[in-house]
Image (spheres, rainbow, N blue to C red):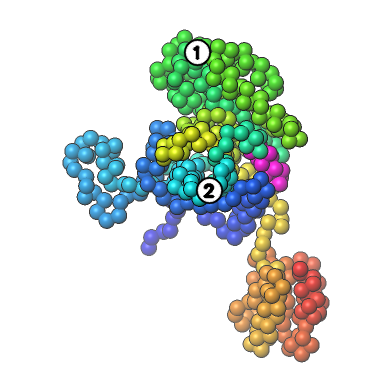
Amino acid sequence: MQKPTLPKGTRDFGPVQMAKRNFILDTIKETFRLFGYEQLETPAMENLNTLTGKYGDEGDQLIFKILNSGDFLKKVTPQDFQEGASATLSKVAEKGLRYDLTVPFARYVVMNRHELTFPFKRFQIQPVWRADRPQKGRYREFYQCDADVIGTDSLLCEAEIILMIRRVFEKLGIQDYSIKLNNRKVLTGIAEVIGEAGKEGPLCVAIDKLDKIGREKVEEELLERGFGPAAIQKLAPLFESNAESISEVLIFLEDFLQVSEIGLQGVKELQEMLQLLNSLGADQEHLVLDFLLARGLSYYTGAIFEVKAHGVQIGSVSGGGRYDDLTGVFGMPNMSGVGFSFGVDRIYDVMEELGLFPDQTLTGSQILLAHFDEKAYGYALGVLSKLRAQGIRAEVYPDLNKMKKQLDYASKKGIPFVAICGDDEIKNETIAFKNLETGEQEFMKVEEAINRLI
């Protein structure tokens, strides 16, 4: 007999876990709607030519490919096998599971541009898949909660993203966290200053690993990517900077990037975003200006965000940034957008580890109708209908069993109240209302029980 298993990097979620997940999702949805975002969904699979080329070389390798239906090898020749995977892939797989929600969103915008009102604000909550190596806090299937604005280059959008992140974390009870900020133009300016103009892509890929592998390994990778020793040496002030406060970092960057026009533009955008936050009545709590923050996705062109919870060994729980021409690859150029994503699975793990889920996240039945015999069972069904008509989550024990078994069932499921139905209750048109936590039991009319439970 085959033992059932799950693919590595995936998880089941039972009723208790789903109640906690819904607590997170409902909090995020409420915040998105508060800021004027509308919900949409896209298919789990996209054409590979939609997905590839948008996430950088490393990202492309993590896309799950879907084999063509039927004889997927029928178009492949012996020569294709000799030339390797690149020659074979396009002939055996034309579709892939979505890697994120941003690229499918860009595709949606282009296909529906004549029906949309711009700026268009949307949120999307769906699973994504990445062929990554599973580890703590990193899964192959996980949910993302994206919010994007497309059709405007206003930095108000970036400021509001910070407000949304802070509101969600406040509602979830996560207090110890940081929102790291940077601007991709700053990184472009850094490449110019060190004499490697145009190589900000590989520079970002290497610097993005700084927290994971350290400075020495990053410098080794830069050498492997074609950066000269002199250029790497010019990065030293960045690695060694003691600037901590946001104002100190901005001063440091203005000095370091003084010969780079685009770098200074990035600094100016950061300053304007912070001024808008101030105009919105918000302070700089939880904000960290990290000029080495890169984020690996190649389509970012302006502000970038990354959120980390402290006190837990889990990576970033939210991130995003501005992309000035993501829709251009689909034939709709010059459509600026900005967005970010909450990692629900990681937020769940953070809250679980820190014990932040409130007890009331459980939303099972409020009351169980128990019965002694078939006659009482019929009476309980009538009571059940009355309870549900008033919006009370109620269920009846479906089988004719001993009362102890029915009470045990309610206790194990965490149902707080039991309405016991027997001959006396039928005669008096009442129920025996039992509180399982205190053990107290009293007789009452169904209407009184309804008032207790609403």
In the picture, measured across the screen, residue 84 lies left or right of residue 150, that is: left
Q: What amino acid is at disc 2?
A: Leu
| Mark carried by residue 116 | 2
Which one is in front, 345 or 274?
274
- The one nearer the camera, 446 or 434, is 446
Query: Could you give the CA–CA distance between mark 1 and mark 2, rounded to whole angstroms?
Result: 43 Å
The residue that appears at 72% across and 82% down in the rendered structure is 421
Residue at horizontal 58%, vertical 33%?
Answer: 153
Q: Which residues are magenta?
A: 161-174
Q: Position of residue 395 (x, y in %)?
A: 65, 74
Report the disc number at residue 5. none
Q: Can residue 109 be seen?
A: yes
Q: Is residue 425 magenta?
A: no
Quadrant hosting residue 121: top right
Asked where in the image residue 281 lies, by quadrant, the reply is top right
Q: Is residue 168 magenta?
A: yes
Along the line of sight, the residue nearer the viewer: 408 or 72:
72
> Residue 143's spot in the image, x, y percent?
53, 48
Residue positioned most to the front: 114
* Neighbourhood count class around disc 1 (C-alpha, 10 Å): few under 14, some 14–19, many 20 upward: some
Quadrant for the C terminus in the image: bottom right
Which residue is rendered at x = 77% and y = 86% of the image?
429
Inspect this view and state whether residue 349 appears. no
Q: Identity of the amino acid at label 1?
A: Ile
The residue labelled by disc 1 is 194
